[in-house]
Image (cartoon, rainbow, N blue to C red):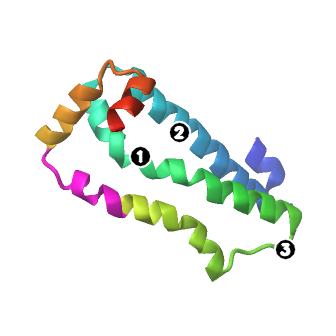
Amino acid sequence: MFFYFNVGKDKSWIYLVVLLLVLSMNGMVFYIIHYSKSVPLISFVLVHFGWLFFLGGPSLYFYIRSYVEKEFTPGKWHFLHFLPIVLNLVVAIPYLVQPYSYKIEIARQQVGMSPSAYVASLK
């Protein structure tokens, strides 16, 4: 319904939809990592969806900017907001090329660990 009533009016709703999807995916990923007991699911979600956390900022920026400026179109310098996502993907490459057994072992360590214990283990 949201798409139907807003098509053609302005394009700020596209950024809002992306923001809402990112926020809901972040909640789902947080739940899977910290409260799920599924080792294969945690091993997949742990790094493969990490870039989603960095997509919320640019989508919020583009939503507000397009809502304030009705004729807003992102220029080439606006895509610098996506630089943290690219950096996250570059940092994640060593994990992504590891064998599946290594990922399962890290996920087994993660199962049952509370969010505060996870943060403490990083220090």
Numbered badge on residue 25: 2
For badge 1, the amino acid type reads: Phe
Q: Amino acid at mark 2?
A: Met
Distance CA(mark 3)–CA(mark 2): 29 Å
Foreground residue, 15 or 107?
A: 107
Q: Are marks 2 and 1 in contact (CB under 8 Å)?
A: yes
Place residue 117 in its image quadrant. Answer: top left
Stretch in magenta: 90-99
Q: Is residue 109 visible?
A: yes
- Counting residues from the N terminus, which is met first, the one under dot 2 or under dot 1? 2
Chief secondary structure of the magenta span?
Answer: helix
Residue lying furthest bottom: 76
User: Relative to the observer, which residue lies in front, 88 or 8?
Assistant: 88
* Residue labelled with disc 3: 71
Q: Is residue 107 magenta?
A: no
Between 75 and 120, which is closer to the camera in this rendering?
Answer: 120
Q: Is any part of residue 8 visible from this angle?
A: no
Q: Distance between the Cα atoms at labels 3 and 1?
A: 32 Å
- Crowd band around label 3 with a 10 angstrom C-alpha radius: few (<14), some (14–19), many (20+): few
**Spot occupied by residue 96 in the image (x, y as percentages of width and height):** 24, 53
Q: Is residue 91 magenta?
A: yes
Q: Say which residue label 1 marks.
A: 49
Frontmost of labels 3 and 1 is: 1
Residue 22 location in percent, x, y? 58, 45
